[in-house]
Image: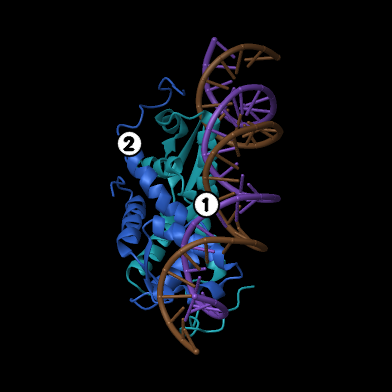
Chain colours: A blue, B cyan, C brown, D purple
Amino acid sequence: MSKQEAGCCAPLPEDPLAAEQAAELSMMFKALGDPVRLRLLSMIASGPEAGVCVCELTPAFELSQPTISHHLKLLRQAGLVDCERRGTWVYYWARPETTDRMAAVLGSVGDRRAVTA
Amino acid sequence: MSKQEAGCCAPLPEDPLAAEQAAELSMMFKALGDPVRLRLLSMIASGPEAGVCVCELTPAFELSQPTISHHLKLLRQAGLVDCERRGTWVYYWARPETTDRMAAVLGSVGDRRAVTA
DNA sequence: ACACTGCATAGACAAACGTCAATACAGCCT
DNA sequence: AGGCTGTATTGACGTTTGTCTATGCAGTGT
């Protein structure tokens, strides 16, 4: 809907980041676009490799248990963490593949190269 | 308001990512939590170092000009880009300090070390 | 001075988000 | 079986977000 005749210069030759990839990546970034989720991921990533129990995460915030559970669900849907039930408790651990991919995109921006992660 | 008597294990010793830093960082991640803004940053970062004209960015999307202007404003407020007016046109360029800082946080998650960026 | 172009701002509105209380589900333990 | 604890799901509600149209502002050029 917004077509402009080249006034100053030619249009950008090629879209550096395809719309599809941008949609997928933006969901990951959005998942970390909340301070609670960012802290949750940080706590999970800095915990033992076997995973961190939800019962350790919940009391660290002044939020209700369902709210923490909701944020954990979003982190899981974004591929940032995964979880497993062990008896009574549920343990969460980080998935570095996802954060590495995001870091690659940011790194390419910093390097002033095309973003193609 | 959610106090739980340690059932399985001791509470996490120290908050790896302070609430303040998390709030600041989450604003940056939130800024990239939209596919349009992610593509905008990608296009700006892969353009010439002197900056990319808005008139090159707007026609790349099927969105109104004010909407693109709004997204650029959010990217600027997040510290991801900066801009300058040159005559009739406005040019945007990336600020790698910000993306580098975000990448550092993500990298420390991937390395399974405490997040202290 | 005036009209024109490029970009930003203001206001409106539907959709998505963060939060909670209430409830449901899954495993343990008598 | 039945109660208890830890976690997830549901439904509701106020706030924020993304988008638009309409308008304003800055520079250019006649």
Residue at x-position 57% and y-position 71%: A61
**Element type at mark 2:** loop
Residue B103, compared with residue B108, is above or below; it is: above
Residue at x-position 41% and y-position 48%: A26
Q: Amino acid at mark 2?
A: Asp
Q: Amino acid at mark 1?
A: Ala
- Front residue (pair A79, B56): A79
From this viewpoint, is residue B109 visible? yes
Q: Report how far apart the C-alphas of labels 2 and 1 lie in the structure.
A: 23 Å
Percent coordinates x, y for residue B107 in the rendering = 35, 65
Residue at x-position 46% and y-position 45%: B34
- Front residue (pair A64, B32): A64
Percent coordinates x, y for residue A69 in the rendering = 50, 64
Q: Quadrant of residue C13?
A: top right
Q: Which residue is mark 2?
A: A15
Q: Which residue is mark 1?
A: B78
**Element type at mark 1:** loop
